[in-house]
Image: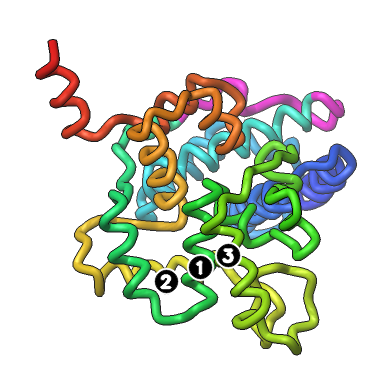
Amino acid sequence: MLFSDSIQRFHSYMESKDYAETTINGYMKQLKYFRRWIEDKYNGPVYLDEIDLTDLDDYLLYRKDKGDKTASRSRVGYILKSFYKFVARKELGENLALDLEPVQPRKKERDYLTEDEYKEVLEEIEKPLIRSVTIAIYYTGARISECLNLKLEDLDFKNQVVHIKRGKGNKDRKIAMNGSLKKELQNYIQNIRPESVDSDYLFATARSGSLSRSYYNRRLKKAVERAGVKKDITAHCLRHSMAVSLVQKGVDLPTIRDILGHESLKTTSIYVHSDMTQMRDALEAI
């Protein structure tokens, strides 16, 4: 079987198992990168059984030489392991990635915004659409993909609930809509969202009917720079900022876990670390 055909088989398998669309797209993107690299290496189409463990190791080394960060290469390795696990399970070939050494990402403290910094950045956002998305992420703790995939029907203003559908792990969850977010979203729908937009997406431009993650992050970074905040802030950092704020306000971890959609408290406890000031105050109290 051609390697390209096995990728399509894997794609069909993920669809049949109702993998999240963002997950499928991410896996296919990386596997196609690998396919192009392996076909270039062997100067033509490659059969699945012609690829060996050395090829996988060489590809990860190629990605390193290309300048990919450790976390990116770690994700590529994980995707290759998932793909070859499928290959072995469906008896299409052997699981080459069983012996693939994992790329150990260097643990890095993720930047986040303090409440004052968040307000300063918000004031520097020029486009009302970007401002509304920023507020939505901050008040829900939603992932950027979850936020941008929201549909108008996912907002329950009567019961003040935001429905996150097919989030990470293809799971649904409900997040309470506080008064500030309710007011912001109602104003956005009535006064900012283009009336002519032909789309069910909540956050949308008249031209595309949606909003891309890359465009949002570019606009957010510009606002961060204008606010004079010397931190590497992305949409995911807003989610982190919200979680840290909740911890500092004394909200219990199980509640924060449910808001963020984490599987376990272990993930939440790592994600919502204390800042140094809070840590120092705690130690001074001993």
Q: In the rendered image, is residue 129 in sight?
A: yes
Secondary element at tag 1: helix
Using the image, determine if residue 268 lies above or below residue 229.
Answer: above
Which residue is under mark 2? 218
Q: Position of residue 69 (x, y in %)?
A: 37, 47
Q: In the rendered image, is residue 38 in sight?
A: no
Q: Which mark is residue 214?
A: 1
Looking at marks 1 and 3 on the same chain, the residue that comes earlier in the sequence is marked by 3
Q: Position of residue 52 (x, y in %)?
A: 62, 33
In reply to whether residue 97 is colored magenta, the answer given is yes
Q: Main secondary structure of the magenta part?
A: loop
Task: Please identify, in this view, whether the residue under mark 2 or under mark 3 is nearer the observer.
Answer: 3
Looking at marks 2 and 3 on the same chain, the residue that comes earlier in the sequence is marked by 3
Q: Residue at x 74, y 49 (%)?
A: 159
| Camera-side residue of 51 and 247 | 247
Q: Are marks 2 and 1 in contact (CB under 8 Å)?
A: yes
* Outermost residue toward the top in this view: 286
Q: Picture quarter containing residue 36?
A: bottom right
Which residue is under mark 3? 183
Secondary element at tag 2: helix
> Which residue type does callout 1 highlight?
Ser
- In three-dimensional space, the C-alpha distance between marks 2 and 3, rounded to whole angstroms, equals 26 Å
Q: Residue at x 74, y 36 (%)?
A: 49
> Which residue type does callout 2 highlight?
Arg
Task: Please identify, in this view, whether the residue under mark 1 or under mark 3 is nearer the observer.
Answer: 3
Q: Which span of residues is magenta-colored?
A: 89-102
